[in-house]
Image: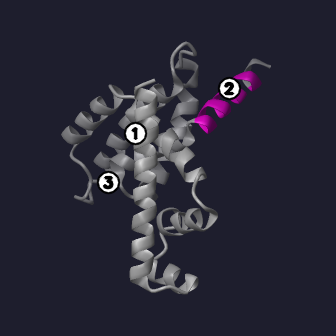
Amino acid sequence: MEQKKQELQFTTLLTAHRRQLYAFIYSLLTDHTDAEDVYQRCSMILWDKFDQYDAECDFLPWAMGIAFYEVKNFLRVSSRDRHHFSEQLLNQLFERMQGSSAPNMQLSSLEKCLKSLRQKDLWLVQQVYWERRKCASVAEEMGMKINALYDRVGRIRGQLRDCVQRRVSEVEHA
């Protein structure tokens, strides 16, 4: 019975922080395939070490600490690509991110701002950023010129930036 309770607690915590953990890993690797591989390995390691997790502490910082070392291990093993950050820079980024709750606040603000977009604009963001489709094919599908698509994406990004800044500012001044 205790095993099932522990599995449920782990699954709940990992699911709740999945996006933030993946975003953290991706911010250190900048390649979706590598980030996905590391995320999967990290999830298994988190489960293996879950009995060491202190429920009195926040799950995300604990998981990010483990993910950080898994990223470092991945980079050490896959030193084939020089486009990755140096270990020293990774350490500096990790220290800076640990001392700030801003990335979490910005991410949750971005999620809320995305929900406030018009359906057509949200679809466009999904195609260009999440699906990583070529702008030319999206423009063709929408029946618009490529420059018009670039302008529209730029306006949407501006709206999202302003919305996130406004929400973060409201929280900081509350």
Mark-to-mark CA distance, 3 and 2: 33 Å
Q: CA distance from mark 1 to mark 3?
A: 12 Å
Q: Which residues are magenta?
A: 4-16
Q: Which residue is mark 1?
A: 70
Disc 1 versus disc 2: distance between alpha carbons? Answer: 22 Å
Question: Which numbered disc, 1 or 3, marks the residue closer to the eye?
Answer: 1
**Helix, strand or loop status at disc 3:** loop
In terms of image quadrants, where is residue 32?
Answer: bottom left
Q: Is residue 120 left or right of residue 163?
A: right
Q: Mark 2 highlights which residue?
A: 9
Q: Secondary structure at mark 1?
A: helix
User: Of helix, strand and loop, which one carries label 2?
Assistant: helix
Q: Which residue is under mark 3?
A: 78
Amino acid type of disc 1?
Glu
What's the residue at 53%, 18% (across, down)?
Answer: 52
Q: Amino acid at mark 3?
A: Ser
Say above or below: 115 vs 118.
above
Could you tell me if the residues under marks 1 and 2 are in contact, i.e. CB atoms within 8 Å?
no
Could you tell me which residue is drawn at 51 percent across and 64 percent down? 125
- CB atoms at circles 3 and 2 under 8 Å apart? no
Q: Quadrant of the N terminus?
A: top right
Other residues around mark 1 within 10 Å, as few (<14) / some (14–19) / many (≥20) = some
Which residue sits at x=56%, y=41%? 18
Q: Nearer the viewer, residue 134 or 63?
A: 134
